[in-house]
Image (spheres, rainbow, N blue to C red):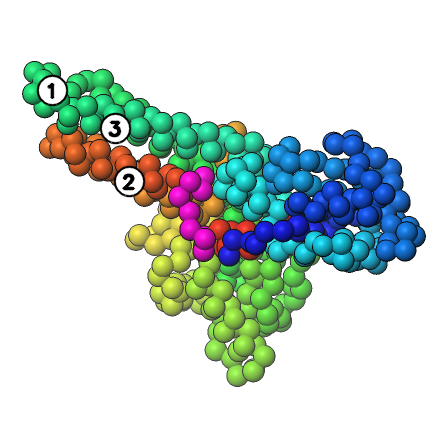
Amino acid sequence: MIPGPGTIAAIATPPGRGGIGIVRVSGPACGRIATALLGEVPPARLATLRDFLDELGDPIDHGLALYFPAPHSLTGEDVLELQGHGGPVVLGILLRRVLELGARQAGPGEFTQRAFLNDRIDLAQAEAIADLIDSGSAQAARAALRSLRGEFSAQVHALVEAMLELRMWVEAAIDFPEEEVDFLADRALGERMAAIRVRFAELSENARQGALLRDGLTLVIAGRPNAGKSSLLNRLAGYDAAIVTPTPGTTRDVLRERIEIDGLPLHIVDTAGLRDSADEVEAEGIRRAQHEIARADRVLYVVDASDERALAALDEDLEALPTKVPCTVVLNKTDRVSAAAGTEAAVAGGPTRIRLSAMTGAGLDLLREHLKDCVGFHPSEGGALSARTRHLDALRRARARVEEAHRLLVERHAGELVAQELTDAQRELGEITGEVSSEDLLGRIFGSFCIGK
């Protein structure tokens, strides 16, 4: 829901002890609250050392006060920031005092939402704030910062402007059909359409790379007991995250670790060995393993390369996996067999097979490169823009509209239909920056933010 009016306040620093704690206030009552708390309204945009006073005039804390009068603030409203000591008790007392003076508790993301509603930032920039806070790698942080600074939005606006100019050209041909020159067959029109299609491809790829940096890849390690699943997890993580023993069924629950490969986040899920078991606890672990497999982005199916029976049953095991989930077969324990580590071509259209040793680490680099290749991740590219699934969906829909406009132009010279497709493409792009948005969409986006941001 779009938030109500009034003055809002929240603790803007994480819970717990810290050297500094911040209470942020935004809204028309900031001046009155500042006078009651500090004795006066501080000078604009100048950090001043003040006592923060309670209702009796006694100090609650001693720290810096900053005042940003509207419209020169993040939210576009009057904003007061009180930077005191970072203990939860003193911050709680200070926030209660601000609420007593007429503010209300801010909801999740409400400060940023006010910035959006007051045209200080667009929706893509607002989402980039949350992405910057949540970034799991340096590359993801840089991509989020580029979007926060408006690079994503600028490229979207440039595409919209290019399509608007193309529409004007097409509609001119519609409005003046009696002219001897066929504007729809003009070479320059075709060149403009081609340039727009190229820019769509470039922006879509940069956004896709950013989405990979943001969301990463959920990787489930599955296989029979004692195939070396937990050893593979430990080798990928770089430390002993899972218990490893020769006893089958050691892993009985789902174990999650988060690592990165050249900036690509990997959410790794280690699971119980897949087999029939009468043990109630192990059976529950196997049920949870199957649940994780069904919702994975990719499954690493680990097989003991020294176990002839496991190799003979591999095809049958793979058929039991969900068909919609991509799979890579990891032939583990190559240190026990004569075959060296390496990558094998898919067998009869089946999944790629990678030979490695989780014990020695041989073949691990091949696996890492394979995982990046699977999702088309290019860590060296510097144009990635922090993007979300909804951005990619909007780009895909807009791009499809442009491709249809190109087909209609080339095959039918149907100017009215071309103009309509371009108009619809502009509307799809408007969803990215928030020029076209619903109250429900805004509620979902800002509801995912932390309180105080």
Q: Which mark is residue 424?
A: 2
Quick one: SS at disc 2? helix
The mark nearer the N terminus, 2 or 3, is 3
Q: On screen, 3 above or below 31?
A: below
Q: Name the residue under label 1.
A: 182
Q: Which residue: 87% across, 41% down? A: 50
Q: Which residue: 48% across, 33% down? A: 152
Q: Which residue: 56% across, 54% down? A: 4
Q: Name the residue under label 3.
A: 167
Q: Distance between the residues labelled 2 and 3?
A: 11 Å
Q: On screen, 184 above or below 250?
A: above
Q: How crowded is mark 1: few (under 14 residues within 10 Å), some or many (20 or more)?
A: few
Magenta range: 433-441
Q: Residues within 10 Å of mark 3 (few under 14, many from 20)?
A: many
- Give percent across and percent down for residue 351: 38, 53
Of residues 229 and 212, the one nearer the viewer is: 212
Q: Is residue 274 left or right of residue 347?
A: right
Q: Which residue: 19% across, 18% down? A: 187
Query: Are the two marked residues, 3 and 1, in contact with CB atoms closer than 8 angstroms?
Result: no
- Give percent across and percent down for residue 139: 58, 36
Q: Residue 24 carries which label?
A: none
Quick one: SS at disc 3? helix
- Kind of residue sitting beneath label 1: Asp
Q: Distance between the residues labelled 1 and 2?
A: 24 Å
- Kind of residue sitting beneath label 2: Asp
Q: Distance between the residues labelled 3 and 1?
A: 15 Å
Does the rendering let one see residue 273? Answer: no
- Give percent across and percent down for residue 10: 70, 52
The mark nearer the N terminus, 3 or 1, is 3
